Amino acid sequence: MSKINILDKSIFNRIAAGEVVEKPASVVKELVENSIDAGATKISIEIIEGGIKQIIVSDNGCGIEPDDMVKAFLPHATSKICTANDLDKIGTLGFRGEALSSIASVSKVNLISKVKNLDIGNEIILEGGEVISQNEKGCSDGTYISVSDLFYCVPARAKFLRKPKTEESDVTNIVSRLILANPNIQIKYTADNKLVYFSSGNGIEEAIYAIYGKNVLDNLIKVDFNSYDKLIHFNGYICKPTFSKPNRTYQTLIINGRYVINQQISTAIYKAYENFLMKGNFPFFVLYVTLPLDKVDVNVHPNKQDVKFEKSGEIFTLVVNAISEILYGINHIKNIEDESEEQNENVDFNLKDLQDLQKVENVSLKTTVVDNVTLKEKVFDEEKFNQIKENLNSYLSKQDKHNEVTFKSDNGYSYDLAMQAYKNMQQQSFISNSDTNSVNDNKIKLDDFKIIGTLFNTYILVEQDKNLLMIDQHAGHERLLYDKFKKQFEEHSLLSQSLLVPYILNLNFQEWSFINENLTTLKNLGFDIEGFGNNSFKINSVPLLLKDINIADFFNSILHDINNNLIIKKTDLMEEYLAKSACRSAVKANDNLSYNEIEILLNLLSKENQVLLCPHGRPIVLKITNNEIEKWFKRLV
């Protein structure tokens, strides 16, 4: 008797949905990526109750042909690829043909679409994957899709959905990544009828500004570098070392237009920042990577967020070296300013504009019937528009960028003009805020200074170019000693100390392979290490500098990044020890330094490309401008 069953499509669609449609955020991602693949320049995203009740995505893309409306919801139906060879050079965001069929199998779907060369569009309604109706429908060019009651027909999945606000948070996160990944597409996102994000599609900087605001944008450094063969190109923004985050959620990596999560590149960037960040902090970045389609595999997982590179080791080295060079090429003097006042003004401005824009959208609708097709025209309240106009012009006048905002055309009040006015205002604000966003802001050197004295026998006070500089004497000396110890360490071989009893390091096969690949580095470091049976090593001696280490803990730290297949470096292993040694040897807070000692310290810190952060990431120099001091004493308002 046969024991093998051919599953019904309703069953295998739900199985596929388990990987493709994990939560509302997954649905939003798949639908928006379809809009992007359709060539849309404007995309609107709306969710109700975290996307559990309803998700609506509309666009002005190429639309779906009437004959393809039903096909679009069949399993493995896609317009993105035709042959197996296409899998080797995937240039679209979607290609598996699983998303729409999986989404439709666990929800209620209403799809309306029209292609540009047709006079009328089509509508199809599905419930639980079954077509309920299909007919012609009057609509604009592009596609509108509504997904309602997610998992209504799969109670076992529905009960695992979290609270609407939690699901909304995940949707908001993925939308922010989609905006950053597509900075030249206008994307509007609302949750429970409240505007969350509006990106006008005017480039990377504007997209970052729309998601994170002025404070983040002011603390970024523009990067642009290539591999030696010019096949791999990186560009985007990384943070100044004085501006870091407590977790990795502020990291966005875009590869060939696709938002991905790649631990290897994330680790490479962290390695470059290691000498600049305080422990437990992580760098912010928005990076775009362009490389040949056949050099990266995006077909690793149905969610398409995990990718594999052909030459991952070379990419890792490229990122570490390029970003390290950028970071070492700037000084890191922290400006003291009234950040709270500045940030509050920016927040009030942003919230106010979003609220005003929300009011603009709450317009009445005038209904007309043309050739049996019902059309709805947006009609504006003139009083509301005058108020919004007054608010926007008031802001622009305060910024000394006063350009009269007009919402009215020859044909009356226009929604498009209102939206354009908001975009223009947002862009003007962005430009005014980003004028000072330059690496050169950090190119301040400790030269031509006048020593004032010391504060608390800890901070050296220096006057320079109408600025007051405060230098932490311990942090400055610690950095100088760390750089000196590191250079000596790299240029000389290390002495070893024999163990009375050899240490046996037992590992699994993957760990054994990783250590075996890095044996040369470990031996150069001063370890006498050799193979000892299956998946084990015998350690006969350790570096003299590490004579008191816990060997098990030391190798556990080495094996921490094993999944990234990294090649460890001698200095990486000794980073923490060198930092501790420099800290112990440096002058301390409350040490009374002579004038000559202060002058020598400042001259050393003034050398070209000297990093002005201690090995633990703390700033060495704080700058207080003359204007800021004048404000404190109310000489300037």
Image (tube, helix red, strand yellow):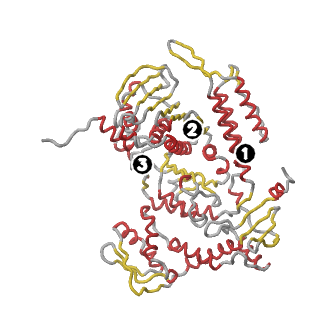
Whether label 2 touches label 3, CB < 8 Å: no
How far apart are the alpha carbons under marks 2 and 1?
A: 28 Å
Label 1 packing within 10 angstroms: few (<14), some (14-19), many (20+): few
In the rendered image, which residue does mark 3 sit on? Answer: 298
**Residue 178 at x, y percent in the picture:** 53, 43
Per the image, label 1 sits on a secondary structure element best described as: helix
Q: Is residue 73 above or below residue 182?
A: above
| Amino acid at pointer 3 | Val
| Amino acid at pointer 2 | Ile
Per the image, label 2 sits on a secondary structure element best described as: loop
Q: Residue furthest right?
A: 635
Could you say which disc has been placed on residue 185 in the image? 2
How far apart are the alpha carbons under marks 3 and 1?
A: 43 Å
How far apart are the alpha carbons under marks 2 and 3?
A: 23 Å
Q: Which of marks 3 and 2 precedes in the sequence?
A: 2
| Amino acid at pointer 1 | Glu
Label 2 packing within 10 angstroms: few (<14), some (14-19), many (20+): many
**Residue 110 at x, y percent in the picture:** 44, 27
Mark toward the viewer: 2 or 1: 1
